[in-house]
Image (cartoon, helix red, strand yellow):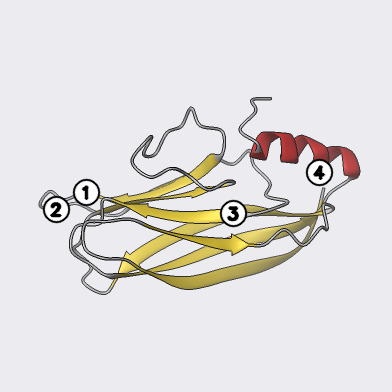
Amino acid sequence: MKRTRTRTLRGVIDIASGTTGKQQVIVDDGLINRGYKVTGFFVWNNAGTTSFISYLSFSPQIFGSKLMDASNNSQFAWTWLGSGAGSSIERIIDPDHVAVRDMFVNIENAGGAERFNYMIVCEEYTVSNDEAIINIIKEGSQSL
């Protein structure tokens, strides 16, 4: 793999209070020799105090089934804010992933805000055919 540049993907997800939302952020462009490694995953809202759970995944997730599930190989980055006093935003990013197709931002258990901002910082890589195939298998939630 050879790193080519850094990209920033930003956007807004509008949801109703206490519900869920998702956004597809990279559309499969058919170029399997281009991959993205997420180095930063930030989610926030204008209120700044509204609790939420958010994660990045390689495939659309069924909401409410398995929130922030590290055993689900299609999930690879998590950001959350608890509802207790003094809670701060926490983040975890699995360093062993490369997205060559789609990524989805998922927000669940949002308690009060209707608009969430997100910013994903990722490094773009050129990958060989073999590396691309391995990462596509991983995206399909297969363990390697």
**Number of residues whose C-alpha sits closer than 10 Å to that of mark 4, classed few (under 14), some (14–19) or many (20 or more):** many
Q: Of tags 1 and 2, which is closer to the observer?
A: 1
Residue type pointed to by label 2: Gly
Question: 121 left or right of 51?
Answer: right
Question: What label sits on residue 132 in the rendered view?
Answer: 4
Q: Of tags 4 and 2, which is closer to the observer?
A: 4
Instruction: Tell me the residue at 63%/38% (across/down).
Output: 96
The answer to whether residue 90 is visible is no
Q: Of tags 4 and 1, which is closer to the observer?
A: 4
Question: Is there CB contact under 8 Å for labels 1 and 2?
Answer: no
Question: 115 left or right of 73?
Answer: left
**Number of residues whose C-alpha sits closer than 10 Å to that of mark 1, classed few (under 14), some (14–19) or many (20 or more):** some
Question: Is there CB contact under 8 Å for labels 4 and 3?
Answer: no
Residue type pointed to by label 4: Ala
Q: Quadrant of the C terminus?
A: top right
**Residue pointed to by mark 2:** 86
The mark nearer the N terminus, 3 or 2, is 2
Q: Of tags 3 and 1, which is closer to the observer?
A: 3
**Residue pointed to by mark 1:** 82
Mark 3 vs mark 1, CA separation in Å: 24 Å
Residue 17 position, x and y percent, is 21, 63
What is the quadrant of residue 49 in the picture?
bottom left
Q: Nearer the viewer, residue 104 or 135?
A: 104
- Quick check: 138 above or below 50? above
**Number of residues whose C-alpha sits closer than 10 Å to that of mark 2, classed few (under 14), some (14–19) or many (20 or more):** few
**Residue pointed to by mark 3:** 103
For the residue labelled by badge 4, is the local secondary structure a helix, a strand or a loop?
A: helix
Residue furthest to the front: 62
